[in-house]
Image: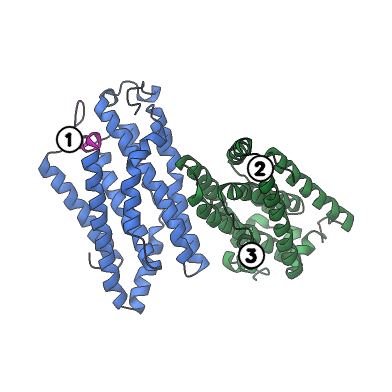
Chain colours: A blue, B green
């Protein structure tokens, strides 16, 4: 870790970034998001081989390319903070690879739901954390969460398929629950291993933090957003 | 084909586009390039799984994402010409899929060379054809050929590997020849099946064309550029 390198001119005067544990946390966070984008890209490109038509394939590849487009932004911010992007991503490879390994879609609809629900959950979580970041890092994180409206395509396809085969709804609802469970398992693993990252939510010099009750409310909000998302797909959460 | 639909306002007064066989040819050309971008994206994403490091993987995924970024531009131009992008791409799927099927890389270096040499050959060919296009279509084609400098990475990796293991050079030189041969085979197949496309080079109202000698010189130029590209990799063509 190179968290002790000098800040870039853009960050001069940021008290938050002079707090070394905050800085290590930001580097962790950006590293986790960046590796998440790479692994999402890879999985979406792999899932695209299951697409029933060239139109569907192009739609899922567009989601993949959008994820990848965020990578440069995240890497640039890491370099600005004096960190090596690859060193910053390294600690998160196991958890994210395990998540994907344990949630390999068995068909096209499972892969659509994984793209929509998985990406949505991650975005909700990072958006919550963004509130506790210095402005420049926050902008980078928020920009990296835009999905360019590709998710409408998923909603359309999944709802159409359930209308044609209502039994599919039951199976896909279970799948959504499994995705949520596996995401929480891997998030806990990361929280246990990366002290700096989990202390980000606790606050520090020049930064407000969260008490346990507030963390509880945050997870309630994330769960509610997941339920809304499943409902938009026509599925019980 | 919807080549007889009215031209968009941007093309008003273009004599070339009032020539229906030219228009059909342009739709074919854009369809072929667009499907080429999709299939290149898919193969690069697949090849990325062979990358020896995360840095290498990101470099090849960046090449894939660049290819995909051109797709929207090509599809937009097809729609401007009143064509359905998916109908326009359909006639080229077999030839491009066969090309990839017959040139599946067996290791990381073969995939690097395929990305560099295959993409380069296609770009040289389309750049030659671009000279015979109406200005607006030409701009779209030329913009779709930019590789954002990713090829420096391939040259660096391949030269480094050959330095370490000179025997690799012989095998990869053969591989480059096989890529060239397979590309010509599939190009001939397309030329035989798509009259409008091959007549593009012959010219028409308001457009200069090529005689057989000029077509021969064009292929000589493309072959020379291929040889230069192989030489940059440290390989005999």
Instruction: Tell me the subunit letter for badge 1.
Output: A
Chain where mark 3 sits: B
**How far is the residue under mark 3 from the one under mark 2?**
29 Å
Q: Earlier in the sequence, mark 3 or mark 2?
A: 3
Residue at 34% across / 78% down in the picture? A165
- Foreground residue, B151 or A112? B151
Q: What is the span of residues highlighted in magenta in the rendered image? A: A194-206
User: Residue at label 1?
Assistant: A202
The verdict on a common chain for dots 1 and 3 is no
User: Tag 3: Cα neighbours inside 10 Å, few (<14), some, or many (≥20)?
Assistant: few
Query: Quick check: A168 left or right of A215?
Result: right
- In the picture, measured across the screen, residue B121 lies left or right of residue A169, that is right
Q: Of the numbered discs in the image, which one, if any, rests on residue B98?
A: 3
Which quarter of the image is occupied by the N terminus of chain A?
Answer: top left
Residue A201 is a magenta residue: yes
Quadrant for residue B194, please give it. bottom right
Quadrant location, the C terminus of chain A: bottom left
Q: Residue at x 28, y 22 (%)?
A: A18
Tell me what residue is drawn at x 39 percent, y 22 percent: A9
- Observer-side mark, 1 or 3, equals 3
Q: How many marks?
A: 3
């Amino acid at each position: 870790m190179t968290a002790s390198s000098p800040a870039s001119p853009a960050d001069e005067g940021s008290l938050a970034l002079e707090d070394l544990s905050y800085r290590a946390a930001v580097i962790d966070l950006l590293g986790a998001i960046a590796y998440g984008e790479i692994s999402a890209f890879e999985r979406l490109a792999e899932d695209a081989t299951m697409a029933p038509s060239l139109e569907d394939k192009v739609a899922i590849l567009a989601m993949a390319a959008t994820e990848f487009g965020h990578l440069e932004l995240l890497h640039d911010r890491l370099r600005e903070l004096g960190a090596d992007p690859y060193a910053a991503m390294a600690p998160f490879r196991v958890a994210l690879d395990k998540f994907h390994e344990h949630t390999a879609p068995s068909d096209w609809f499972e892969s659509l739901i994984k793209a929509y629900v998985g990406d949505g959950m991650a975005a909700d979580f990072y958006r919550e954390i963004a509130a506790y970041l210095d402005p420049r890092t926050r902008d980078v994180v928020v920009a990296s969460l835009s999905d360019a409206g590709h998710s409408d395509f998923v909603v359309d396809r999944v709802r159409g398929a359930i209308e044609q085969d209502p039994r599919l709804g039951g199976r896909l609802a279970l799948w959504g629950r499994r995705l949520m469970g596996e995401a929480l398992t891997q998030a806990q693993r990361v929280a246990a291993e990366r002290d700096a990252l989990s202390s980000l939510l606790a606050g520090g010099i020049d930064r407000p933090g969260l008490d346990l009750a507030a963390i509880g409310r945050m997870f309630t909000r994330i769960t509610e957003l997941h339920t809304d998302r499943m409902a938009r797909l026509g599925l019980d959460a």
